[in-house]
């Protein structure tokens, strides 16, 4: 198998694992406070990534110079994850996954302001098609809702989380001072865990951890390991084998994988008209995969 084929398989698995966090998150979002869940999630993911750093590159003391960088990045990622689970209390997993596909366009805008990175016309068309497909799903394939700008509460909440994610991606490049990706991610996770522990102390103490149903614990460990540590490794593996445009393209496959997760978990599927919007996100994926010569504005961050 060629190295490029290996990269594509890695990103296929990446998008499938990320999609699972939406479906599982939607099932338990009302069982546990988002701050409490994500505080534990950051701790578990931090232990996993920190262990990987120790056995691979090591963690030099110089990596923790200017710790404010990690606090900023950890805070942004914590906002993203907390608002994701807050939004899933009232939003369907497919709709939330559609909102997530807006992140590449947001990252492109922030990257222009922070890094002066430009997108090509092909990239702009692909991002536009993907955004159109996302909006079609977000507004439930209802033109009246679109014209009235009638958005669900959960989608609005998660949209602000996606803004934080979109800002996080170019900031990683701007603030990195030569640290390896695994070490830099470890610092971000530690900072995020500290911030969530402080802000969410009330929710953490108020949670009856022994009374949580098994599915909540399955979700916590899934998002900590499968949708955090493992996806981090997959993105790093793929970026060594594929142009960044192709790595970013797989973001648009997440809503389709969410449909597969919904079927597997026995949940109801959205109306057929909504599937048309998902079809547009797949078209955006194909456009971004088409050309090897043009780099993406910003590759996606690993789902830590």
Image (spheres, rainbow, N blue to C red):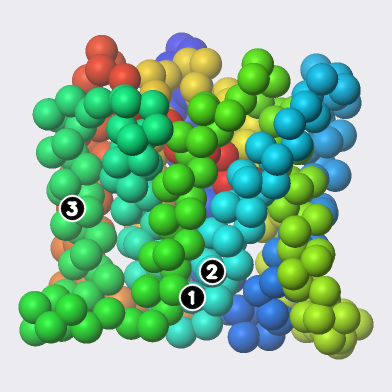
Q: Residue at x 87, y 81 (%)?
A: 205
Image location of residue 250, percent across then percent down: 38, 40
Looking at marks 1 and 3 on the same chain, the residue that comes earlier in the sequence is marked by: 1
Image location of residue 37, percent across then percent down: 73, 70
Q: Residue at x 80, y 56 (%)?
A: 194
* Distance of label 2 from label 1 (alpha carbons): 6 Å
* Distance of label 1 from label 3 (alpha carbons): 23 Å
Comparing labels 2 and 3, the label whose residue is closer to the camera: 2
Image location of residue 107, percent across then percent down: 37, 42
Q: Secondary structure at mark 3?
A: helix
Q: Quadrant of residue 136?
A: bottom left
Residue 280 badge: 3
Q: Secondary structure at mark 1?
A: helix
Is residue 87 shown left or right of residue 105?
right
Q: Residue at x 82, y 20 (%)?
A: 62
Q: Nearer the viewer, residue 110 or 227?
A: 110
Q: Residue at x 70, y 46 (%)?
A: 71
Q: Residues within 10 Å of mark 2 (few under 14, many from 20)?
A: many
Circles 1 and 3: CB atoms closer than 8 Å: no
Q: Quadrant of residue 147?
A: bottom left
Image location of residue 225, percent across then percent down: 72, 49
Q: Quadrant of residue 4?
A: top left
Circles 2 and 1: CB atoms closer than 8 Å: yes
Looking at marks 2 and 3 on the same chain, the residue that comes earlier in the sequence is marked by: 2
Residue 142 visible in the snapshot: no
Comparing labels 1 and 3, the label whose residue is closer to the camera: 1
Q: Does 265 appear above or below 248?
A: below
Q: Mark 1 sits on what residue?
A: 87
Is residue 239 shown left or right of residue 99?
right
Residue 68 visible in the snapshot: yes
Q: Mark 2 sits on what residue?
A: 83
Q: Residues within 10 Å of mark 1 (few under 14, many from 20)?
A: many
């Amino acid at each position: 198998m060629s190295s490029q084929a290996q990269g594509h398989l890695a990103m296929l698995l990446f998008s499938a694992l990320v999609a699972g966090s939406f479906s599982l998150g939607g099932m338990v979002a009302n069982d546990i406070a988002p701050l409490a869940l994500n505080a534990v999630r950051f701790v578990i993911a931090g232990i996993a990534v920190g262990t990987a750093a120790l056995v691979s590159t090591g963690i030099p003391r110089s990596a923790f110079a200017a710790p404010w960088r990690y606090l900023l990045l950890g805070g942004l990622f914590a906002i993203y994850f907390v608002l994701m689970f807050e939004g899933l209390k009232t939003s369907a997993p497919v709709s939330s996954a559609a909102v997530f596909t807006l992140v590449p366009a947001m990252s492109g805008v922030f990257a222009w302001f922070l890094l002066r990175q430009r997108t090509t016309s092909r990239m702009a068309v692909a991002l536009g098609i993907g955004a159109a497909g996302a909006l079609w799903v977000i507004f439930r394939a209802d033109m009246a809702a679109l014209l009235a700008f009638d958005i669900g509460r959960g989608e609005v909440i998660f949209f602000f989380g996606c803004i934080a994610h979109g800002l996080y991606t170019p900031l990683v490049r701007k603030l990195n001072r030569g640290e390896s990706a695994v070490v830099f991610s470890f610092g971000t996770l530690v900072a995020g865990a500290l911030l969530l522990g402080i802000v969410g102390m009330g929710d953490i103490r108020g949670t009856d951890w022994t009374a949580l149903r098994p599915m909540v614990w399955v979700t916590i460990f899934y998002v900590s390991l499968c949708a955090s540590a493992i996806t981090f490794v997959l993105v790093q593996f793929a970026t060594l084998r594929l142009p960044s445009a192709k790595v970013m393209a797989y973001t648009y496959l997440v809503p389709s994988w969410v449909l597969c997760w919904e079927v597997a978990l026995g949940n109801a599927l959205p109306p057929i008209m909504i599937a048309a919007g998902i079809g547009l996100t797949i078209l955006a994926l194909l456009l971004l995969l088409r050309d090897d010569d043009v780099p993406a504005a910003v590759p996606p961050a690993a789902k830590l």
